[in-house]
């Protein structure tokens, strides 16, 4: 989260110093960080800055801009657009355009491509991509290892393998990231798949009250949806409707629909039953339901 502010500050300082190419680099990373966080409007703004308009003069900056745009497309459920952008990014990432200390472009592209495969309902392809990232990436990177573990858990849930999902999330319980919001949100989803609705609510609590580490907008939306499902399953439909309304209101300005689709059929059912036509988010909710009806089916053990 701090990276978003640091990169914005760096870009301003580089612009003031007349270092246009480095400014484009900073804006590219900022756009990617904003998109990863879930603030899609801020990501678009960063991509639209004059510094980013000339990124094609620097292949590295162009690669970052394309990756940020791919993440934007994924978050908005434009999977075809995201795949095309990822193919473009692969061409840039194959060259030696990175500066010392920068994360590998190919790893960032691989993470987005894995999530795109999952969004397409291709759990097998996503698992193969995770294995490739583990095989080809620099060993000893705890952040990347944790991200891949979260993806492994997500893949298991999508494949309906609750036991494997539980083993995966348990393996991360003793790690330094166990208190991070995404870890807690994933634990909540595993507990939902096991029918432990009270436990699911306990896991989402620190995410929703802000006491968890690294609460991104994307993870907060996912936690709101998990909590809505858990409350509905325990008969607290009023609370579930309020949480669902919060999620819709938070996501609508950015058209961040993918997080709802990723949450599965239980969220589709909740939207159908709990969002009335008089809701201020009824139009957005209707568009999400249309996307549910047109996406590829996939197995889900959590629902």
Image: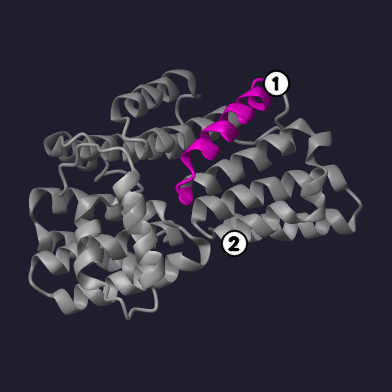
Position of 255 with respect to 246 (left or right) is right
Q: Nearer the viewer, residue 15 or 155?
A: 155
Position of 21 with respect to 154 (left or right) is right
Position of 181 with respect to 65 (left or right) is left
Residue 78 among magenta residues = yes
Q: Residues within 10 Å of mark 1 (few under 14, many from 20)?
A: few
From the top left corner, tell me how far across and down residue 63 is, in percent: 67, 34
Task: Name the secondary structure under disc 2.
Answer: helix
Image position of 18 with respect to 255: above or below? above
Nearer the observer, disc 2 or disc 1? 2
The residue pinned by badge 1 equals 95
As drawn, the label of residue 41 is 2
Of marks 2 and 1, which one's residue comes earlier in the chain? 2
Q: Nearer the viewer, residue 142 or 218?
A: 218
Are dots 2 and 1 in contact, CB under 8 Å? no
Q: Residue at x 31, y 50 (%)?
A: 292
* Residue 212 seen anywhere in this rendered image of the structure: no
Q: CA distance from mark 2 to mark 1?
A: 30 Å
Q: Which residues are magenta?
A: 75-95
As drawn, the label of residue 7 is none
Q: Residue at x 35, y 36 (%)?
A: 118
């Amino acid at each position: 989260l701090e990276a978003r502010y640091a990169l914005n500050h760096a870009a301003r300082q580089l612009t003031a110093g007349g270092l246009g190419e480095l400014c484009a680099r900073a804006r590219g990373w900022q756009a990617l960080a904003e998109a990863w966080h879930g603030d899609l409007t801020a990501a678009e703004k960063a991509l639209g800055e004059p510094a980013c308009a000339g990124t094609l003069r620097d292949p590295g900056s162009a690669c970052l801009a394309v990756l940020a745009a791919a993440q934007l497309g994924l978050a908005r459920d434009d999977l075809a657009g995201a795949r095309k952008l990822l193919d473009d990014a692969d061409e840039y990432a194959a060259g030696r355009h990175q500066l010392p200390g920068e994360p590998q472009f190919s790893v960032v592209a691989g993470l987005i491509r894995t999530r795109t495969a999952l969004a397409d309902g291709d759990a097998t392809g996503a698992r193969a991509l995770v294995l490739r990232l583990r095989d080809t990436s620099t060993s000893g990177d705890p952040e990347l290892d944790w991200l891949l573990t979260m993806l492994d858990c997500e893949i298991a849930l999508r494949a309906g393998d609750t036991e494997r999902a539980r083993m995966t999330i348990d393996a991360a319980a003793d790690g330094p990231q166990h208190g991070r919001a995404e870890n807690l949100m994933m634990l909540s989803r595993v507990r939902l798949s096991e029918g432990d609705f009270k436990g699911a609510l306990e896991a989402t609590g620190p995410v929703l009250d802000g006491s968890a580490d690294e609460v991104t907008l994307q993870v907060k939306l996912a936690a709101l949806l998990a909590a809505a499902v858990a409350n509905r399953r325990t008969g607290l439909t009023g609370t579930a409707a309020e949480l669902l309304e919060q999620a819709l209101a938070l996501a609508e300005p950015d058209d961040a629909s993918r997080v709802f689709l990723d949450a599965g059929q239980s969220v589709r059912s909740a939207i159908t039953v709990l969002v009335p036509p008089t809701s201020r988010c009824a139009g957005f909710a209707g568009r999400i339901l249309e996307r549910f009806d047109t996406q590829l089916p996939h197995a889900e053990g959590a629902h």
